[in-house]
Image: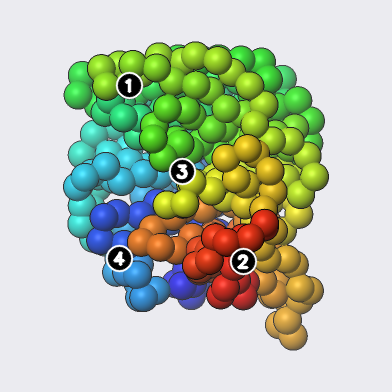
Amino acid sequence: ADLPLGQPGVPEGLTADTKGNIYAASFVLTSNFQPPFNNNIYAWNPNGQLLSTTPLPSHVVSLGNVVVGNTFYQIDIWNGDVLEYNLPLTNLSTPTRTYDICDGYASLSSGQGKFCGLNAIEMISDGKLLISDNGASDFGQNQGNIYYLDPTNSTSGIFFSNSALGPLGFPPFGVNGLAFSPEKSALFMGNTSTDTIYKLDLTGCAVSCLPGNFSVFAQGGPIDGPDNIDFDDNGLLWVASSQKDQVVVLNAQGLVVQVVGSFRGLSSDGAPISLMGPAGIVFSQGNIYVANQANPTLRLVNVPINMIGNPPRYEGLNI
C-alpha cells in the first residue's frame, strides 16, 4: 500500500486490528517547527486498499500507535500526548479523549515543562499502555523512560527508567521500539542510538505488571539504528534496522537468523527502490508489515513457512 498521492509525510509507527486492517500515521514537521503540521492517520484493509484518511488535529505530530479492542491510540510527539479514537476511523473522526503524558517537543520552543520524545506504544497485559521516550541528545535530554498510561482512570507516570535507554550515540534517539514477548513475560526495547535491543523481565502481569531484571538481548552487527520491533507467532523478533535499510530477525537467544530487504538504489524518477529507512513494523495474520520512511510505501513480508534448519528458510521475502 502507498500513502494517498499528494498527502503529506511518510509512514512511521504501524499497528493492526483483529480484522487485519493496517494503520499508519504520517510524520510531518514544518520547516519552522511550528503548527499547523497537518498529519493524517491512514487505514488499509489486508489487501492494501485504503479504507480511510483521518486528519489529525493541526498541532499533532504523530508517531507510534496501537489498537486495543475497538479503540485506537495515537502518540502525539509534539505535545507529549496520547490521543484516543473510536473505531472504525473515518475522515470525520476526532479524538474522544486526550491523555497528557509529558511536555513533548513543544516545550523546546516554549521553554516550559519537561521535554520528552514519545515514540512507540504497546498494551501491557494488565490493560495499561506502555510508551517509550526516545529523548534527544541534540536537546540535552537523556531520560531513558518508559511511561505507563491507564485509560480506565486517566493516570500516567514512569513505569521504568534506565540511563541505557537514553540517546547515547547516533542517531540521537534512545529507546524507540517496544514489543512484548509472546507469553507477556518480558518487554523488549530497541535503542536506536546504541544499536541495542534490551530485555526487561516482567512479573505479576495478571494483576499489575512489575519490572524485573534488565539486560542486553542483542547488540550491533546488522542491528543498526533499531526503530520499531514486533514478534511473530513463531517467537521471532523482527527489528526495523533503519540505518542499514533492512529488517533483522532474531531468535529467542537474540541471535540473527535472517536479514531481510536492502536498499537497491533509485528508480528513474528518483524514488528509493526497496527499503530505505524502515521505521514501523507490525505482525498481523501471518505477515510482517514494514513502513518505509524514505518513500511513502508499506511493504509486505511473508513470515517463515519452514522452520527446519539453522537458519530457518524463508519464502516470499521479496522486498
First of labels 3, 1 by sequence position: 3
Q: CA distance from mark 1 to mark 2?
A: 34 Å
Gap in angstroms between the C-alphas marked 4 and 2 = 36 Å
Rounded to the nearest angstrom, the CA distance separating label 3 from label 2 is 31 Å
- Which dot, 1 or 4, sits closer to the camera? 1
Q: Give the left or right position of residue 203, taking residue 86 as reference.
A: right
Label 2, residues with CA under 10 Å away: few <14, some 14-19, many ≥20: some
The residue labelled by disc 4 is: 52
Pick whichever of labels 4 and 2 is earlier in the sequence: 4
Q: Amino acid at mark 2?
A: Arg
Q: Which residue is mark 3?
A: 64
Q: Is 257 placed left or right of 36 in the picture? A: right
Observer-nearest residue: 198 or 174? 198
Q: CA distance from mark 3 to mark 4?
A: 18 Å
Q: What residue is rendered at 44% in x and 20% in y?
A: 202
Mark 4 residue type: Ser
Q: Position of residue 13 (x, y in %)?
A: 49, 49
Task: Give the mark nearest the N terminus, 3 or 2.
Answer: 3
At numbered mark 4, what does the secondary structure look like: helix, strand or loop?
Answer: strand
Q: Is 230 on the left-hand or right-hand side of 149?
A: right
The residue indicated by pointer 2 is: 313
Q: Which residue is mark 1?
A: 205
The reply to whether discs 3 and 1 touch (Cβ–Cβ < 8 Å) is: no
Instruction: Give the residue at x 26% y 28%.
Output: 127
Which of pointers 3 and 1 indicates the residue nearer the eye? 1
